[in-house]
């Protein structure tokens, strides 16, 4: 009996998980990640920040990367970090590049299961848009008086997205080695939009929508607790004195305002800090 050849199985170690952060968020956001989902992917997760920090360098076992990008929530700084994330991934030799923000909770086993459904040697851009129609932008062209109108989809950075190695290899000549920043400068849009521009517009690889990614641009309270195990990412935000957080049983709101400790205990009830049950 000859066994039918099976596609290679994706394991956690095939994935490069990058998290964008900044000096001001080390204590308020990074610490929470380190105590929860990072513990399930310590060797695969890297934090891209803008300062040296010995305390968190130790807590992450050397996985904090000072990009030397400037601090601040402006396009150039954010594109600089995304460019660094992409370049370090390309060097890593891993099969999948997954980007997240530091206000994301990543459901690690679900992420592995998701990527196992796709081949890293095929071009894949997996993520979730936050707008209901493709983005329309106007490119100024040098030799004509008319502006060129183009449309494309992009995956919201704050929900997380993944790129196959095959796709990143196609990106390498145009966006590798820091060139990602120049493209961002040219179109003058944020890093996640720049990513969509490169992949959908320049390389003509379409975004594959994966609904299991979630940014805080969605109302978190509508994600049902009985589907948590099936979601790839979650987020939280505090705006206008209101929290946009998931509705989950667990610790009280004072102990766990962002709900990530409670979520972690729902998903992994035997974790050290979870109540006995
Ligand atoms: N960020 C950054 N530098 C800053 C502010 C934010 O690198 O000065 C990062 C932050 O760590 C996060 C992402 O950008 O990963 C989005 O930031 P935030 O959640 O504060 O804003 P949002 O864009 O979601 O409103
Ligand atoms: Mn955010």
Image (tube, rainbow, N blue to C red):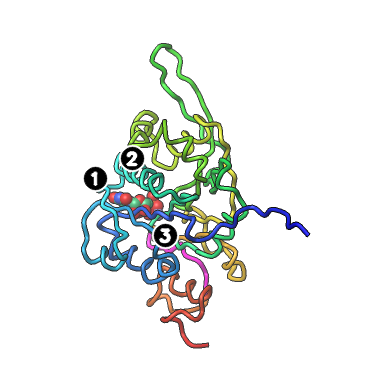
Question: Mark 1 sits on what residue?
Answer: 70
| Residue at (42% x, 60% y) in the render | 44
Residue drawn 49% across the image and 81% down it: 270
Disc nearer the start of the sequence (3/1) = 3
Q: Quadrant of residue 178?
A: top left
Please state the total of marks drawn on the protein image. 3
Label 1 – label 2 distance at C-alpha: 10 Å
Q: Which mark is residue 44?
A: 3
Predominant secondary structure, magenta span: loop
Magenta stretch, residue numbers = 240-248
Mark positioned earlier in the residue sequence (3 or 2):
3
Is 251 inside the magenta-drawn segment? no
* Residue to which mark 2 is pinned: 75
- Farthest residue in the front direction? 1
Residue 112 quadrant: bottom right
The answer to the question of whether label 3 and label 2 lie on touching residues, with beta carbons closer than 8 A, is no
Q: Is residue 241 magenta?
A: yes
Residue 40: where, in percent of width, then height? 45, 68
Q: Is the residue marked by circle 1 packed among few (<14), some (14-19), or many (20+) residues within 10 Å?
A: some
Q: Is residue 235 shown above or below 137?
A: below
| 198 up-or-down from 114: above or below | above
Determine if the C-beta at disc 1 is less than 8 A from ligand 1: no
Name the one closer to the observer, 173 or 53: 173
Which residue extends farthest bottom? Answer: 276
**Quadrant of the frame with the N terminus:** bottom right
Q: Residues within 10 Å of mark 3 (few under 14, many from 20)?
A: some
């Amino acid at each position: 009996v000859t066994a039918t050849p099976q596609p290679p199985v994706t394991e956690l170690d095939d994935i490069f998980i990058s998290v964008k952060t900044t000096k001001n968020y080390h204590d308020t956001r990074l610490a929470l990640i380190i105590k929860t989902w990072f513990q399930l992917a310590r060797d695969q997760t890297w934090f891209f920040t803008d300062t040296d920090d010995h305390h968190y360098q130790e807590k992450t076992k050397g996985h904090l990367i000072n990009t030397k990008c400037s601090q601040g929530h402006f396009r150039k700084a954010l594109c600089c970090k995304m460019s660094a994330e992409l370049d370090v991934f390309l060097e890593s030799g891993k099969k999948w590049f997954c980007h997240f923000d530091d206000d994301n909770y990543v459901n690690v086993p679900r992420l592995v299961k998701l990527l196992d459904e796709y081949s890293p040697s095929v071009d894949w851009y997996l993520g979730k848009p936050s707008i209901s129609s493709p983005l329309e932008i106007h490119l100024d062209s040098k030799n004509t008086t008319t502006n060129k109108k183009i449309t494309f989809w992009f995956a919201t950075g704050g929900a997380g997205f993944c790129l196959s190695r095959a796709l990143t290899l196609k990106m390498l000549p145009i966006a590798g080695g820091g060139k990602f920043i120049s493209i961002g400068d040219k179109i003058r849009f944020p890093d996640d939009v720049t990513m969509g521009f490169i992949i959908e517009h320049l390389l003509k690889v379409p975004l594959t929508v994966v609904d299991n990614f979630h940014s805080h641009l969605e109302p978190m309270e509508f994600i049902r607790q009985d589907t948590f195990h099936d979601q790839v990412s979650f987020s939280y935000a505090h705006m206008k004195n209101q929290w946009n957080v998931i509705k989950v049983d667990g610790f009280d709101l004072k102990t766990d305002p962002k709900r990530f400790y409670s979520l972690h205990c729902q998903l992994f009830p035997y974790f050290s800090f979870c109540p006995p049950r």
